[in-house]
Amino acid sequence: MVLTTLTRNAAMPSDAEISMMVRDPMQWITDYKVAKAYRIPSSASNSSTTWVLNQSPSRWATQVWLMGDGTSDAFAQIRNQAGPGDQNYSALNMISMVSNDIVTVNINGLT
């Protein structure tokens, strides 16, 4: 699962970028986010700073959850790989879940 802010007055992501976002989100972060300008969430204008891995507000503007395959993931909490050390603000907390609620899914062409 990937979400990110879009910069204002800029073209939508290319097909190549969208494909990488879906197929290899960690490489997408490296190629398309790190050291690039971005918009801070809920900001009306683009940020004048560049996107930095493991730093807020960058990790709030881009969130990547690998659903159990990420750094520090556990069945009760899936960490945002844009800042996996953050367990309070951008992690997915699995409320009332048990470990066998998570199952492996294979999608032709993606796995």
Image (spheres, rainbow, N blue to C red):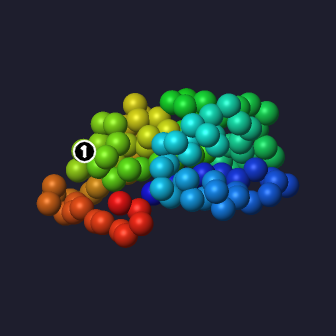
| Residue found 80% across the figure and 57% down from its top | 11
At horizontal 56% and vertical 41% (from top left) the residue drawn is: 29
Q: Is residue 51 left or right of residue 69?
A: right
Q: Is residue 83 left or right of residue 44?
A: left
Q: Are there few (<14), some (14-19), or many (20+) residues within 10 Å of tag 1?
A: some
List the residue tagged with mark 1: 74
Whether residue 57 appears in this view of the structure is no
Q: Where is residue 86 shown, x and y percent of the image?
A: 42, 34
Q: Kindly state the secondary structure of the residue where label 1 is placed.
A: loop
Q: Nearer the viewer, residue 16 or 84?
A: 16
**Is residue 25 in sight in this rendering?**
yes
Q: Residue at x 28, y 65 (%)?
A: 105
Residue at the far front in the pictured view = 109
Identify whether 6 is placed above or below 105.
Answer: above
In the picture shown, does residue 107 fall above or below 46? below
Q: Quadrant of residue 19?
A: bottom right
In the image shown, does 86 or 37 lie closer to the viewer? 37
Q: With respect to residue 12, does 56 lie above or below?
A: above
Residue 31, percent from left and from top: 61, 40
